[in-house]
Amino acid sequence: MFVLVEMVDTVRISPWDFHKQLNDAIAEELNKKLANKVVYSVGLCICLYDITKLDDSFIFPGDGASHTKVHFRYVVFHPFLDEVLVGKIKYCSQEGVHVTMGFFDDILIPPESLQQPAKFDEAEQVWLWEYETDEGAHDLYMDQGEEIRFRVTDEVFVDTSPTGPTTATEDTAAQPGQSTGPPPEAAVEKKQAPYTLIVRIYSHSKNILYSHSKNTHSEPLHSALFIRMIYYFIICHSIYHSHCSQSHKHFLI
């Protein structure tokens, strides 16, 4: 899930930071520049791990800051394909189920990767699994906030670097009184995520948490087993103490 990536960058240290240790000042600048940022084809940068090499620092004419070429390793969130992760359902839409891991939200389970047969409830805005049993079909809802296991199947990187404005050519020059702004569809263009994980539900259905109904939210499926284990533990604990108490009484007698 997390990997160490070797990087090289030239770090600029402002004059008012010269009183700091060079390593500390560079680490602060690197985290300020990279932390919580997506590097194309690399992943989501988390924090600096260590600095492996520092080249000589230079001060260029007209700039009082120092410039240092730095070799360092950075902690990056970049799950490998087929890795199984745990997250929570953020919300559902026609595109699929959107999952969050707290620090990373751009995770999508497309409809074809849900457990089948699945359908989207327009009224409740949730996906549900029509689970077949001997007693008939039961609708298991994928509620917001429920934990879910998923397997990474693909990743999508999008270059979101800013681009310059489109210039009007001579043959399409704006006429007097004509608006020169972008068309309405361009003005409301949907913002794309720089890094998206495409995943599918983990094949072991018992590790997926559902609610049987929107009105009566049941406990997670694995909670019943946990409660049963606690119940058996209490019984065994009571029997053990009862046996020890009887043995102690016999010893006193």
Image (cartoon, rainbow, N blue to C red):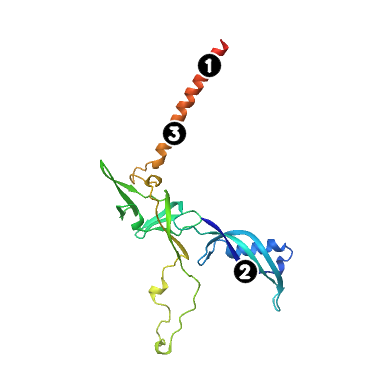
| x then y, percent, for residue 174 | 41, 86
Residue at point 43%, 30% (across, down): 231
Q: Is residue 10 above or below residue 85?
A: below
Marked residue nearer the N-terminal end (3 or 2): 2
Crowdedness of circle 2 by 10 Å Cα count: few (<14), some, many (20+)? Answer: few
Secondary-structure class at tag 2:
strand
Relative to 13, residue 101 above or below: above
Asked whether 144 or 9 is in front, the reply is 9
Query: In this view, which residue lies farthest toward the bottom?
Result: 170
- Contact, CB < 8 Å: mark 3 with mark 2? no
What's under tag 1, amino acid-wise? Ser
Q: Quadrant of residue 97?
A: bottom left
Q: Position of residue 59 (x, y in %)?
A: 71, 74
Q: Which mark is residue 168?
A: none
Which residue position holds label 3? 229
**Label 1 neighbourhood size at 10 Å, few (<14), some (14-19), many (20+)?**
few
Question: At 71% across and 67% down in the image, what residue appears?
Answer: 16
Instruction: Residue type at mark 2: give it.
Output: Asp
Which residue corresponds to mark 2? 9
Residue 20: % across, % down: 72, 62
- Cα gap from disc 3 to disc 1, whole angstroms: 27 Å
- Disc 3 from disc 2: Cα separation: 54 Å
Q: Nearer the viewer, residue 180 or 42?
A: 42
Q: Quadrant of residue 235?
A: top left
Which sits earlier in the primary sequence, circle 1 or circle 2? 2
| Gap between marks 1 and 2 measured at Cα | 73 Å
Q: Is residue 143 above or below residue 21?
A: above
Report the residue marked by disc 1: 247
Badge nearest the viewer, 3 or 1: 1
- Residue at horizontal 61%, vertical 61%? 73
Whole-percent x, y for residue 131 in the image: 30, 47
The kind of secondary structure element at disc 3 is helix
